[in-house]
């Protein structure tokens, strides 16, 4: 796919980012390193938790989204210039072992920079959906993208 610049995007455009299945081992490994709460690391204790079973850390879900975003968009087809951050992240439903998550990105707003003519800002809604089509995570973010040269 050809490289896309700021001018090539449209408000309302939806980009498919790909899918990934989440395993129990992956959930436990991530949580042991970064979010060692029992409902993420111990299947037996997780069964007795409010979740009724093992669930992925929200940060794990966000990390999987970032991987899909880079592999399916900013690392392969867009003139990405980084991001100043996110506005909001929501973990809406638990992610369980065996779930297949699919990422998508919706363009919400396009703002050309007034002070730096080489770039523009794109406001986006990123989502992770499970195999039932339920949104498990939503992230509202902002990214800088290069303008078409010349």
Image (spheres, rainbow, N blue to C red):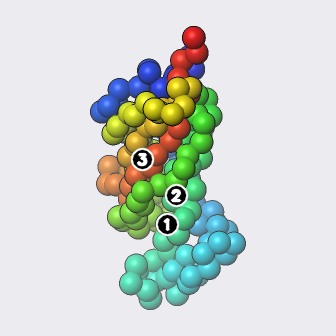
Alpha carbon distance from label 1 to label 3: 14 Å
Horizontal side of residue 114 vs 71, given as left or right: left
What residue sits 32% from the left and 31% below the top?
11
Q: In the rendered image, is residue 14 in sight?
A: no
Counting from the top left corner in percent of width and height, residue 40 is at 55, 76
Residue 72: image quadrant is: top right
Counting from the top left corner in percent of width and height, residue 8 is at 44, 20
Q: In the rendered image, is residue 147 in sight?
A: yes
What residue sits 50% from the left and 41% below the top?
143
Count all numbered tags in the image, as a single digit: 3
Alpha carbon distance from label 2 to label 1: 6 Å
Q: Nearer the viewer, residue 82 or 150?
A: 150
State the SS at label 3: strand
* Residue placed under numbered mark 1 in the picture: 58
Q: Nearer the viewer, residue 139 or 52?
A: 139
State the SS at label 2: helix
Counting from the top left corner in percent of width and height, residue 86 is at 47, 55
Q: Which mark is residue 62?
A: 2
Alpha carbon distance from label 3 to label 2: 10 Å
Asked if marks 2 and 1 touch (Cβ < 8 Å), the reply is yes
Q: Which mark is residue 20?
A: none
Nearest to N terminus: mark 1 or mark 3: 1
* Residue placed under numbered mark 3 in the picture: 126
State the SS at label 1: helix
């Amino acid at each position: 796919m050809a490289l896309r610049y700021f001018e090539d995007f449209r408000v309302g455009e939806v980009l498919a980012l790909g899918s990934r299945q989440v395993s129990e081992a992956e959930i436990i490994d991530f949580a042991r390193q970064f979010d060692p709460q029992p409902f993420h690391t111990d299947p037996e204790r997780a069964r007795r938790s409010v979740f009724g079973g093992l669930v992925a850390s929200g940060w794990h879900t966000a990390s999987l989204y970032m991987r899909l975003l880079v592999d399916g968009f900013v690392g392969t087809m867009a003139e990405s210039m980084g991001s100043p951050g996110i506005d909001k992240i929501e973990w809406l439903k638990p992610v369980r072992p065996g779930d297949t998550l699919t990422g998508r990105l919706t363009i919400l707003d396009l703002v050309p920079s007034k002070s730096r003519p080489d770039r523009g800002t794109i406001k986006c809604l990123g989502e992770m959906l499970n195999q039932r089509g339920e949104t498990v995570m939503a992230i509202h973010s902002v990214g800088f993208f290069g303008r078409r040269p010349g």
